[in-house]
Image (cartoon, helix red, strand yellow):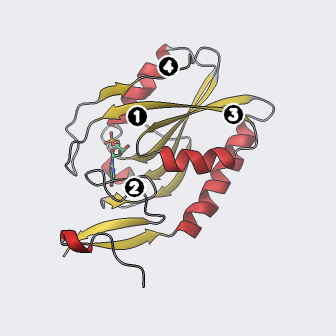
Amino acid sequence: MTPDPAADSGSRLRVVLSQQQIAARVREMGQQIARDFVGESVLLVGVLKGAAVFLSDLARAVPLDASFDFIGTSSYGAEKVSSGEVRLTKDLEQPLIGRNVVLVEDILDTGLTMMYLRQIFLARQPKALKIAALLDKACRRQHQVVADYVGFVIPDEFVVGYGMDYSEKYRNLPDICVLEEQ
Ligand code: IMP
């Protein structure tokens, strides 16, 4: 039996999306992006750090000429709730002007982060801007943001794994799990 990495912290991990389910859906999302930008190149921008794992799998499922960049934001400290304010902690290294940009996010929650990033990105005049979110907590939305590519719509539960953390832990879990208090 695989040891539960949360066991010592008084929490328990319950798998809600297995690595097989994630892999199958990420492949479909990659094909969808490839169809939308057929014959063109794309810039995949991952939102650090949560989207790093998703971006690396998604990029390999997009059979197009693709480049990567990363942007860093922070709205959560060591808490499970957002502070309600987004800060840019790392800017892009590449210009967006005239490029097909896919903003790659692990999870759309209130929509605050995406709303903030969308404004910044549009001001840099990309040719096209699409949003890919692996998870969508649609019931939590407070800001008007709709992703163009959504992996799974999930209920209002705090999830970890596949890049997502709680207080910087659990990012390396291959499955997506709910962290339950014991
Ligand atoms: P939003 O700005 O409220 O939409 O929050 C988006 C960001 O919050 C995501 O990119 C995640 O980093 C973080 N987040 C929201 N819900 C969860 C969760 O259930 N687990 C881990 N991180 C989350």
Say which amino acid is labelled 2: Arg
Say which amino acid is labelled 4: Leu
Say which amino acid is labelled 3: Ala
Where is residue 98? Give x, y as percent.
64, 15
Q: Label for residue 52?
A: none
CB of residue at label 1: within 8 Å of ligand 1? Answer: yes
Q: Which residue is mark 4?
A: 122
Q: Residues within 10 Å of mark 2 (few under 14, many from 20)?
A: many
Against 159, residue 47 (above or below) is above
CB of residue at label 2: within 8 Å of ligand 1? Answer: no
Q: Which residue is mark 3?
A: 66
Where is residue 58? Give x, y as percent.
61, 48
Q: Under tag 2, what secondary structure?
A: loop
Q: Seen in the image, is 139 located left or right of residue 27?
A: left
The residue that appears at 22% across and 72% down in the rendered structure is 8
Marks 1, 3: nearer the viewer: 3
The residue that appears at 18% across and 76% down in the rendered structure is 182
Against 98, residue 21 (above or below) is below
Separation of marks 2 and 1 at Cα, in angstroms: 21 Å
Q: Earlier in the sequence, mark 1 or mark 4?
A: 1
Q: Which residue is mark 2?
A: 171
Q: Under tag 3, what secondary structure?
A: strand
